[in-house]
Image (tube, helix red, strand yellow):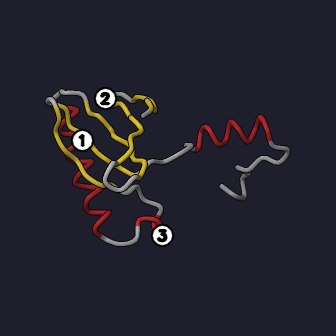
Amino acid sequence: MEYLGSAAFSKAIQCKDLLTDQMVCLKIIENNKDYFDQSLDEIKLLRLINLNGDMDAKNCLKMHDCFYYKEHLIIVTELLRDNLYEFCRYNRENEDEIYFTVGRL
């Protein structure tokens, strides 16, 4: 539905899961052996974390699935909204009180 951004070896796309009617994020990994190996490690870690408790309580990313499509590895995760950088920038520009104080950090 929407292109979210890119990183060193992947692109993030906002999609709608037609079975659950839920918005998700597809992380599409470029077809490169080094990137592929790093992504397999990421998948292993996300599976381990996801199997050991409530992800919301632990503030961890939920991985729904992963699969291959046209020689690309795709990781399906929950859709996260703003990141800390965007929130901090918005807060500095639009709010009277700075959120990230030394005490809060």
Question: Which badge, 3 or 1, comes first in the chain's sequence?
Answer: 1
Do tag 2 and tag 1 residues touch (Cβ < 8 Å)? yes
Residue type, numbered disc 2: Phe
What is the x, y in percent for residue 16? 38, 44
Q: How packed is label 2: few (under 14 Cα within 10 Å), some, or many (20 or more)?
A: some
Dot 2 and dot 3 residues touching (CB under 8 Å) = no
User: Which residue sits at x=69%, y=58%?
Assistant: 104
Separation (CA) of disc 2 from disc 3: 29 Å
From the top left corner, tell me how far across and down residue 59 is, in percent: 47, 61
Foreground pick, 63 / 39: 63
Q: Which label belongs to residue 39? A: 1
* Residue position for label 2: 9
Q: Earlier in the sequence, mark 2 or mark 1?
A: 2
In which quadrant will I find the N terminus?
A: top left
Alpha carbon separation for disc pair 2 and 1: 10 Å
Task: Out of 102 and 25, give the one closest to the viewer.
Answer: 25
Q: What residue sits 28% from the left and 44% below the top?
A: 75
Please give the name of the residue rendered at 37% of the width and 57% of the height, measured from the top-left corner.
62
> Mark 3: few, some, or many residues within 10 Å (few <14, many ≥20)?
few
Q: Is residue 7 above or below residue 14?
A: above
In percent of width and height, residue 26 lies at 34, 40
Choose the circle earlier in sequence order: 2 or 3: 2
Mark 2 residue element = loop
Dot 1 crowding, Cα within 10 Å, few <14, some 14–19, many 20+: many
**On the image, which quarter does residue 91 sit in?**
top right
Q: Is residue 46 above or below residue 82?
A: below
Coordinates of residue 74 in the picture (x, y in percent):
25, 39
Circle 3 residue = 57
Q: CA distance from mark 3 to mark 1?
A: 25 Å
Disc 3 marks a residue whose amino acid type is: Ala
Q: Quadrant of the C terminus?
A: bottom right
